[in-house]
Image: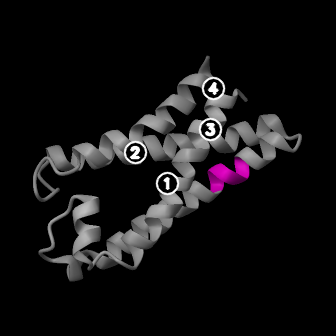
Protein backbone atom coordinates (compact mmCIF):
# COMPACT_ATOMS: atom_id res chain seq x y z
CA UNK A 1 0.00 0.00 0.00
CA UNK A 2 1.29 3.44 -0.97
CA UNK A 3 2.64 5.74 1.77
CA UNK A 4 0.12 8.48 0.89
CA UNK A 5 -2.75 6.02 1.38
CA UNK A 6 -1.30 4.82 4.67
CA UNK A 7 -0.78 8.34 6.01
CA UNK A 8 -4.24 9.48 4.90
CA UNK A 9 -5.96 6.44 6.39
CA UNK A 10 -3.87 6.64 9.56
CA UNK A 11 -4.62 10.34 10.11
CA UNK A 12 -8.33 9.76 9.53
CA UNK A 13 -8.23 6.92 12.07
CA UNK A 14 -6.41 8.97 14.70
CA UNK A 15 -8.85 11.86 14.25
CA UNK A 16 -11.85 9.54 14.73
CA UNK A 17 -10.32 8.04 17.85
CA UNK A 18 -9.44 11.51 19.20
CA UNK A 19 -12.97 12.84 18.64
CA UNK A 20 -14.57 9.84 20.39
CA UNK A 21 -14.35 11.28 23.93
CA UNK A 22 -15.94 14.53 22.74
CA UNK A 23 -18.92 12.73 21.19
CA UNK A 24 -19.24 10.07 23.87
CA UNK A 25 -18.49 11.84 27.14
CA UNK A 26 -18.12 15.60 26.67
CA UNK A 27 -21.03 16.39 24.33
CA UNK A 28 -22.73 18.48 27.04
CA UNK A 29 -19.84 20.98 27.16
CA UNK A 30 -20.33 24.25 25.26
CA UNK A 31 -16.84 24.20 23.71
CA UNK A 32 -17.40 20.66 22.41
CA UNK A 33 -20.74 21.65 20.91
CA UNK A 34 -19.04 24.59 19.20
CA UNK A 35 -16.20 22.34 17.98
CA UNK A 36 -18.69 19.81 16.59
CA UNK A 37 -20.93 22.53 15.15
CA UNK A 38 -24.09 21.49 16.98
CA UNK A 39 -26.83 23.34 18.85
CA UNK A 40 -26.90 22.89 22.63
CA UNK A 41 -30.68 22.43 22.71
CA UNK A 42 -31.76 18.87 23.46
CA UNK A 43 -28.28 17.46 24.07
CA UNK A 44 -29.63 15.25 26.86
CA UNK A 45 -32.00 13.69 24.33
CA UNK A 46 -29.25 12.78 21.85
CA UNK A 47 -26.43 11.79 24.19
CA UNK A 48 -27.21 8.10 23.62
CA UNK A 49 -26.80 8.52 19.86
CA UNK A 50 -23.71 10.67 20.15
CA UNK A 51 -22.14 8.04 22.41
CA UNK A 52 -22.93 5.27 19.91
CA UNK A 53 -21.69 7.28 16.92
CA UNK A 54 -18.50 8.15 18.79
CA UNK A 55 -17.95 4.49 19.67
CA UNK A 56 -18.56 3.36 16.09
CA UNK A 57 -16.16 5.97 14.80
CA UNK A 58 -13.52 4.93 17.33
CA UNK A 59 -13.94 1.30 16.26
CA UNK A 60 -13.52 2.31 12.60
CA UNK A 61 -10.36 4.17 13.59
CA UNK A 62 -9.03 1.20 15.52
CA UNK A 63 -9.89 -1.12 12.63
CA UNK A 64 -7.99 1.14 10.25
CA UNK A 65 -4.93 1.11 12.50
CA UNK A 66 -5.12 -2.68 12.77
CA UNK A 67 -5.32 -2.90 8.98
CA UNK A 68 -2.30 -0.63 8.61
CA UNK A 69 -0.41 -2.76 11.12
CA UNK A 70 -1.30 -5.85 9.06
CA UNK A 71 -0.11 -4.15 5.87
CA UNK A 72 3.24 -3.35 7.46
CA UNK A 73 3.80 -6.73 9.14
CA UNK A 74 3.53 -8.92 6.07
CA UNK A 75 -0.19 -9.48 5.49
CA UNK A 76 -0.58 -6.74 2.90
CA UNK A 77 -3.62 -7.97 0.96
CA UNK A 78 -5.77 -8.68 4.03
CA UNK A 79 -4.56 -5.52 5.73
CA UNK A 80 -5.43 -3.48 2.65
CA UNK A 81 -8.91 -5.03 2.67
CA UNK A 82 -9.40 -4.00 6.30
CA UNK A 83 -8.20 -0.46 5.56
CA UNK A 84 -10.47 -0.18 2.51
CA UNK A 85 -13.53 -1.35 4.45
CA UNK A 86 -12.80 1.08 7.29
CA UNK A 87 -12.19 3.98 4.89
CA UNK A 88 -15.39 3.22 2.97
CA UNK A 89 -17.25 3.31 6.30
CA UNK A 90 -15.61 6.65 7.20
CA UNK A 91 -16.40 8.16 3.81
CA UNK A 92 -20.01 6.98 3.69
CA UNK A 93 -20.64 8.03 7.30
CA UNK A 94 -19.32 11.49 6.43
CA UNK A 95 -21.52 11.73 3.37
CA UNK A 96 -24.56 10.65 5.37
CA UNK A 97 -23.80 13.47 7.81
CA UNK A 98 -24.08 15.86 4.87
CA UNK A 99 -27.29 14.20 3.69
CA UNK A 100 -28.76 14.55 7.19
CA UNK A 101 -27.96 18.26 7.01
CA UNK A 102 -29.64 18.58 3.59
CA UNK A 103 -32.73 16.89 5.02
CA UNK A 104 -32.83 19.47 7.82
CA UNK A 105 -31.84 17.11 10.63
CA UNK A 106 -28.72 19.09 11.54
CA UNK A 107 -29.24 22.17 13.67
CA UNK A 108 -28.23 24.74 12.77
CA UNK A 109 -28.84 23.86 9.13
CA UNK A 110 -25.58 23.91 7.22
CA UNK A 111 -23.68 23.17 10.42
CA UNK A 112 -22.32 19.89 9.10
CA UNK A 113 -20.52 21.33 6.07
CA UNK A 114 -17.18 21.83 7.83
CA UNK A 115 -17.31 18.41 9.50
CA UNK A 116 -18.56 16.62 6.39
CA UNK A 117 -15.76 18.00 4.26
CA UNK A 118 -13.10 17.52 6.92
CA UNK A 119 -14.09 13.92 7.65
CA UNK A 120 -14.44 12.98 3.97
CA UNK A 121 -11.13 14.17 2.56
CA UNK A 122 -8.65 11.79 4.22
CA UNK A 123 -10.58 8.55 3.64
CA UNK A 124 -11.36 9.66 0.06
CA UNK A 125 -7.67 10.32 -0.60
CA UNK A 126 -6.70 6.95 0.88
CA UNK A 127 -9.30 5.12 -1.21
CA UNK A 128 -8.34 6.97 -4.39
CA UNK A 129 -4.65 6.21 -3.93
CA UNK A 130 -5.37 2.55 -3.15
CA UNK A 131 -7.54 2.30 -6.27
CA UNK A 132 -4.81 3.71 -8.52
Q: Residue furthest front?
A: 31
Q: Which of marks 3 and 4 is nearer the N terminus?
A: 3
User: Which residue shows up at 47% across the image and 32% down it?
Assistant: 124
In space, the residues marked 3 and 4 are separated at their CA atoms by 12 Å
Q: Which residue is labeled 2 in the image?
A: 119
User: Which residue shows up at 70% across the image and 26% down it?
Assistant: 2
* Mark identifier at residue 42: none
Judging from the image, what secondary structure is the residue with disc 1 in? helix
Asked if residue 69 is among those painted magenta in the image, a careful observer would answer: no
Q: Which of marks 3 and 2 is nearer the N terminus?
A: 3
* Image depth: mark 1 or mark 4 in front: 1
Q: Which residue is labeled 1 in the image?
A: 15
Q: Does the CB distance between marks 1 and 4 fall below 8 Å?
A: no
Q: Does the CB distance between marks 4 and 2 fall below 8 Å?
A: no
Indicate the position of residue 21 as horizontal and vertical percent values: 45, 72
Question: Which region is colored magenta?
Answer: 63-67
Q: Which residue is labeled 3 in the image?
A: 7
Q: Which residue is labeled 4 in the image?
A: 130
Amino acid sequence: MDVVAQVSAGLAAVILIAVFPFEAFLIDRAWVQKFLGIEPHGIANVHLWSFCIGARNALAGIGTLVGLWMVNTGDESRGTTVVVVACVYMLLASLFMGIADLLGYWLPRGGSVRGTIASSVLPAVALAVIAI
